Image: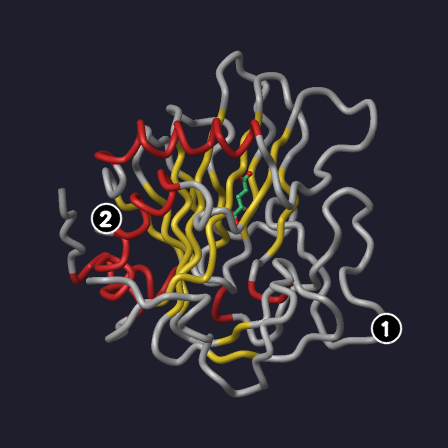
């Protein structure tokens, strides 16, 4: 099923840096759930998300589409690339990476407020991630600060467990704000499996813990458009993609980051 993206949604994405797209992955829920089970059974780059002793389990892994065919089929077969092209105003859409985030029942830990862009070695105006819940979600839905993708400065990237700086040394990032205390407009939606939040790499986002009795499985897909270029960062990025060999100003190499069919 192809989901049409209205002009209003394109305008909202440009202004707010986050929109909900109902049913974008509705035909791919079973496939993505199966892929997530394979991913949990055999993680690759699993990251620490909870301190020892913290309740629950927050599973987080990425860059697995080349070894999990369910992910590859959903990425290449869904209408996500066409939706991304519309939202970004881009002729071409390149796959950056897939990301799985599962909060098991009773995981009180919130996902800290952050923007993804500063962790990445790519910059551009034309970026989009789709955050796709595979369970009905309300409490632990994605939360995005409207308009934050237009802030002048990037938000300081931190390590999720220690909250220490992600890059060594001095850099010119703005401190992580506290959107609730600062009265910012927070966008969040009650969502069905297969709905998607589309959000910009510079959009400040986070999520509450999952204190319900149901799992909160999410698949996140990171895409880039025509103007995305490789940039150097002050240290190893996340994901790191060792041996990528790209130089500042180059588009992402297409053999690792394929152009998706529209
Ligand atoms: O699923 C979450 O709790 C956070 C998701 C997120 O940060 C992302 O998809 O970039």
Label 1 sits on a secondary structure element that is loop
Between the C-alphas of marks 1 and 2, the distance is 43 Å
Report crowding for label 1: few under 14, some 14 to 19, many 20 or more residues within 10 A (C-alpha): few
Is 212 above or below relative to 121?
above
Across and down, in percent, residue 262 comes to 19, 62
- The residue lying toward the viewer, choosing from 253 and 182, is 253
Is 115 above or below relative to 100?
below
Q: Residue at x 32, y 32 (%)?
A: 31
Q: Residue tagged by mark 2?
A: 77
Is 38 above or below relative to 221?
above
Label 2 sits on a secondary structure element that is helix
Across and down, in percent, residue 253 comes to 45, 75
> To which quarter of the image does residue 155 belong?
bottom right
Q: Residue tagged by mark 1?
A: 169
> To which quarter of the image does residue 192 belong?
top left
Report crowding for label 2: few under 14, some 14 to 19, many 20 or more residues within 10 A (C-alpha): some
Q: Residue at x 69, y 57 (%)?
A: 176
- The residue lying toward the viewer, choosing from 15 and 44, is 44
Q: Residue at x 24, y 34 (%)?
A: 26
- The residue lying toward the viewer, choosing from 201 and 120, is 120
Quadrant occupied by the N terminus: top left
Across and down, in percent, residue 134 comes to 38, 29
Across and down, in percent, residue 186 comes to 48, 47
């Amino acid at each position: 099923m192809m989901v049409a993206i209205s002009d209003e949604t394109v305008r909202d994405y440009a202004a707010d840096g986050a929109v909900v797209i109902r049913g974008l992955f509705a035909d791919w829920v079973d496939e993505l759930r199966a892929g997530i089970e394979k991913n949990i059974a055999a993680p690759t780059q699993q990251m620490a998300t909870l301190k020892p002793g913290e309740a629950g389990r927050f599973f987080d892994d990425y860059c697995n589409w080349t070894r999990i065919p369910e992910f590859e089929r959903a990425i290449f077969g869904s209408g996500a690339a066409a939706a991304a092209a519309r939202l970004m105003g881009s002729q071409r859409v390149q796959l950056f990476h897939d990301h799985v985030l599962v909060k098991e029942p009773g995981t009180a830990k919130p996902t800290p407020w952050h923007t993804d862009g500063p962790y990445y070695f790519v910059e551009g105006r034309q970026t989009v991630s789709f955050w796709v819940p595979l369970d009905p979600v309300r409490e632990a839905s994605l939360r995005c600060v409207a308009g934050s993708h237009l802030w002048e400065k990037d938000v300081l990237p931190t390590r999720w467990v220690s909250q220490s700086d992600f890059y060594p040394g001095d850099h010119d990032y703005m401190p992580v704000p506290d959107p609730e205390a600062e009265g910012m407009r927070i966008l969040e939606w009650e969502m069905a499996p297969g709905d998607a939040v589309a959000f910009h790499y510079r959009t400040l986002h986070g999520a509450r813990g999952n204190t319900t009795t149901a799992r909160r499985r999410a698949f996140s897909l990171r895409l880039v458009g025509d103007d995305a270029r490789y940039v150097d960062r002050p240290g190893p990025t996340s994901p790191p993609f060792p041996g990528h060999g790209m130089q500042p100003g180059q588009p992402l190499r297409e053999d690792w980051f394929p152009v998706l069919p529209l």
